[in-house]
Image (spheres, rainbow, N blue to C red):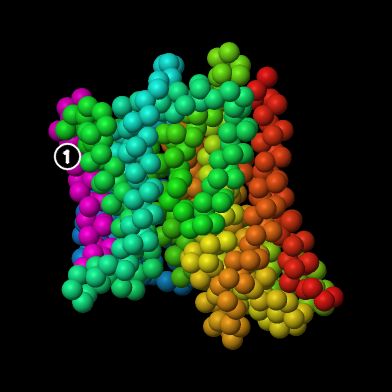
Amino acid sequence: MTPLIGVGVLVVGFGLRANPLGVVAAAGLASGLASGHSVPATLAVFGKAFNEARYVSLIWLTAPVIGVLERAGLRRAAQGLVARARGLTPGRLLIGYLGLRQVTAALGLTALGGQVQMVRPVLAPMAEAAADLGNGGAVTDQTRQEIKAHAAAVDNIGVFFGEDIFIAFGSVLLIHGVLAAQGFDVAPGQIARFAIPTAVLAFIVHAIRLWQRDRRWWT
Amino acid sequence: MIGLAQVYAIAGLVFFAVAIAIGADRAEPRRFRASLFYGLLGMSFAFGDQLGDLGNGVLALALIGLVLGGALGAFKGPDPRPEPQPPISRMRLFLPALAIPLFAFGAALWLPGVHLGKAPLLVAGVKSLPSLVGLTLGAMVALCLCPLCFPMRASEPVAGGRGLLQALGWMALLPQMLAALGVVFAFAGVGGAISEIALSVLPTGNRLAAVVVYCLGMAAFTAVMGNAFAAFPVLTSGLGLPLLIGRFHGDPAAIGAIGMLSGFCGTLVTPMAANFNLAPAALLALKDRNGVIRAQAPTAVLVLIGNIALMNLLAFPNP
């Protein structure tokens, strides 16, 4: 039970709104010490893992080009796209993106999207612009915040519940590997097939939620 | 041969350039400490493999110390709603923007088959390498397309990258730190402790109860570790296989697939998955740090309930 102390530190630290990086350091140290390892040993494990997790931060490699495009007006151009579309509400836009993201992810195109490359410079400004068009520019700050949060959410939900249908995706291969190690040789296609019902369910659930909100977003 | 080292070296150059730009800017408050932060980050990317495990641990702690010491200033979030500007029609801006994912995808598909003479172009054995090389190439090609599509000064890439990174502040580093914490948790035996709890509450005679505990366990374990991939092997070999497959004769493919998707429901509600849930809140200048999680939580709960029903239905076709 004792290693769970680290999880407790994490929950309390996030709950108290302390700086998350400090909380990470405290939680890692706590769980390492509680499980009977020394400070240097815990630090070495953390350092090795930090070095191997650099791929997570590799996305910032796109910062220069995204920065350049935003300075050139990419966000305003994304709003300009919406200005031409009739009948486009924030909810309809986000439902459309959700479906597109799920289908492309299911085909292995997970790179078509992403919070840094797509949501911030393109999708969120388009959703905000759609709300502006419907409400004559009088969109409350509360609504704006909600729309932006939901722009980020559809990107996540779309990719999570789409990528598992693609047989060469990491999680399908991991499932295959874990099952094979225990003597169950299941074809990856079999595994991917069982991801389809959940994908459809996730689309229906989230689309209904967006459709309900749309009536508040677009008056 | 292209490997992770080359990809990380390019990322290191980006961070070094940002460090130099900040250090040379007299108008920047705390410019030396902030420059040191991005310089150390560049070191980690360019030379991390030479630093050793303990060295990398010390480097990570130094980055955290600089943040806690206020090197990056208070977190503000990027340009909190610049004055409204009229929308513009400028389609050519989308060309570089779309080039990033298209090149990333094309390169990930094409590069693994490329050979230089007899040797493959990409180092073998690293599963994620093609997509990481693809992302790097996509970013570089897109940047080269920019001056062809609109007037761009030579200083703009560094200034633009610096602006975006400084607006994010420490948030840019949090996802990687949390990923490392997940590994420390696994090292300390957190996974074993959670499966122990799950097994201790498990009524072994009831199939539906076993399905519920497995799916809820996947979601909860994933929420703690921030990653379904860490949770899946532990809970599936500890609980899913012996009980759901071994005792109740469920379909392994259905149990594995829906079990993993139950884990993804946990990913949607945890700050541990910071790159999906917290970084976007910062990127979009949300006032509520947990705004994205709030938007996702009801869907996550409903899909998790649906997953339990689906597993009960699809994995056990002959009751």
Percent position of residue B134, x then y: 33, 55
> Which is nearer the eye, B184 or B137?
B137
- Tag 1: residue type? Ile
User: Is residue B37 at all visible to an observer of this figure?
Assistant: no
Q: Is residue B217 above or below residue A208?
A: below
Dominant secondary structure (helix, strand or loop) of the stretch shown in magenta:
helix
Percent position of residue A129, x then y: 52, 23
Q: Residue at x 69, y 68 (%)?
A: B214
Q: Quadrant of the image for the C terminus of chain B?
A: bottom right
To which quarter of the image does residue B247 belong? bottom right
- Give left or right: position of A157 versus B274: right
Percent position of residue A111, x then y: 43, 51
The residue wearing badge 1 is: B20
Q: Chain of mark 1?
A: B
Q: Is residue A176 magenta?
A: no
* Magenta-colored span: B1-30
Q: Quadrant of the image for the N terminus of chain B?
A: bottom left
- Give left or right: position of A21 versus A191: left
Q: Is residue A135 above or below residue B32?
A: above
Q: Residue at x 46, y 45 (%)?
A: A113
Q: Residue at x 51, y 51 (%)?
A: A104
Q: Is residue B307 above or below residue A218?
A: below
> Which is nearer the eye, B124 or B234?
B124
Percent position of residue B254, x then y: 67, 70
| Other-residue count near label 1 (Cα within 10 Å), few / some / many at <14 / 14–19 / ≥20 | some
